[in-house]
Image (spheres, rainbow, N blue to C red):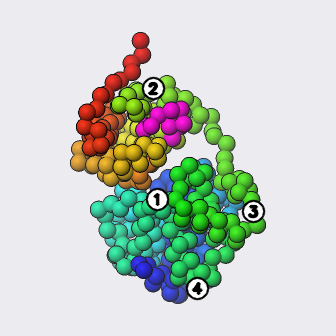
Amino acid sequence: MPATELLTLKNKKVLVVSHRGADVDALASAGIVHLLLMDRNYVEIAIPEHLNNSAKRLAETMEIAYTMQPKFSDFDVLVIVDLNSYNMLGPFAEAVEKFKGKIFLFDHHSASEDVIAKEENSLIVEDAASTTEVLWCFLAEHAPKKLDERIALLTACGLIADTAHFSFASRNTFRVMAEALKKTDKTFSEIIEMFSVERELSERIALLKAAQRTRIFRVNKALIVLSEIGAFESQSAAALLHLGADVAFVGTIEGHSVRVSGRAKFSFAQGYELDLAKDVFHKLSDFFEGEGGGHITAAAFTGRANSVEEILQKCLELLVAKMKEKEPEMAIKEYKEK
């Protein structure tokens, strides 16, 4: 099994790195690695740019320390969690690319073309619901005695957050959750409370604006929506699914820097054999400067363009092209305000 050498590290300086805008799964995964290695090594966690509010809440409740300005040259080993693309590292990308020490990687996103760590030191499980699930299964096989209460709590938090409270999850996901719960003394509701936060007013306004600015397309029986806002694009895309969309693409732009997030209902992705990351977001880099990645039902693109609209339109085109593989005769209608 890849990456087992990680378990033998001793007297090393280890930096655990996750992606910019770290979410609960990213921080929880970093926390698991920290707990795993801290007894025999010096370990720090580094997050580029910022964490989302739920991850900040988890850092407080689980007392997880992290830095945003690590000195990479001080460390012997890097452990990358919850990403496998340099683009997701933001300002850390160059330092990771030039790092001379050993690099390990654990992730559950669709594999990119980037090679951050050698194959024997990487474990990418694309059908896992979260990176905490990947780490739990890895430890259950190779170091089961390490699966203590704190690692169980972090695993559960990552699973709950990355599956949107188990809206999409495999049998293995539920098995891991059941095993993790047995190790804790907390209820499901108490675990959710560890990373739950009230939506800020600015986020609530952004979600409402995303709905207000939506372009709605009917493609056969599916509803696909596009929207442009100033921030909170991933949350807005998820919210539009709850409002009735089958697929939502939401983008934001600052200067020429563009971020686009996409969300798809699991039933829609399953019906069209769609992988949102591979079939849409990875392909955007063929048309625009930047890089995309993610999961089957949740993905994102970060890059440069003259407008968000042109990227949103390309997302629609790539999605429809994938849908036509199943249904060649496809009618597309845009609902416009009268």
Mark 4–mark 2 Cα distance, whole angstroms, equals 53 Å
| Quadrant in the picture for residue 115 | bottom left
Q: Is residue 191 visible from the viewing direction of this image?
A: yes
Mark 1–mark 3 Cα distance, whole angstroms, equals 28 Å
Q: Is residue 92 visible from the viewing direction of this image?
A: no
Of the two numbered discs 4 and 2 on the same chain, state the one appearing first in sequence: 4
Which-is-in-front pick, marks 1 and 3? Answer: 3
Residue at 70% across, 69% down: 182
If the image is split into quadrants, where does the N terminus sit?
bottom left
Q: Which residues are magenta?
A: 238-248
Contact, mark 1 vs mark 2 (Cβ under 8 Å)? no
**What amino acid is labelled 3 in the image?**
Lys
Instruction: Identify the residue position indicated by label 2 in the image.
Output: 213
* Up-down relation of residue 47 to residue 210 (above or below): below
Q: Secondary structure at mark 2?
A: loop
Contact, mark 3 vs mark 4 (Cβ under 8 Å)? no
Q: Secondary structure at mark 3?
A: loop
Residue 97 x/y as whole percent: 34, 68
Instruction: Identify the residue position indicated by label 1 in the image.
Output: 19
**Residue 210 counted in the magenta span:** no
| Quadrant in the picture for residue 94 | bottom left
- Categorize mark 3 by other alpha carbons within 10 Å: few (<14), some (14-19), many (20+): few
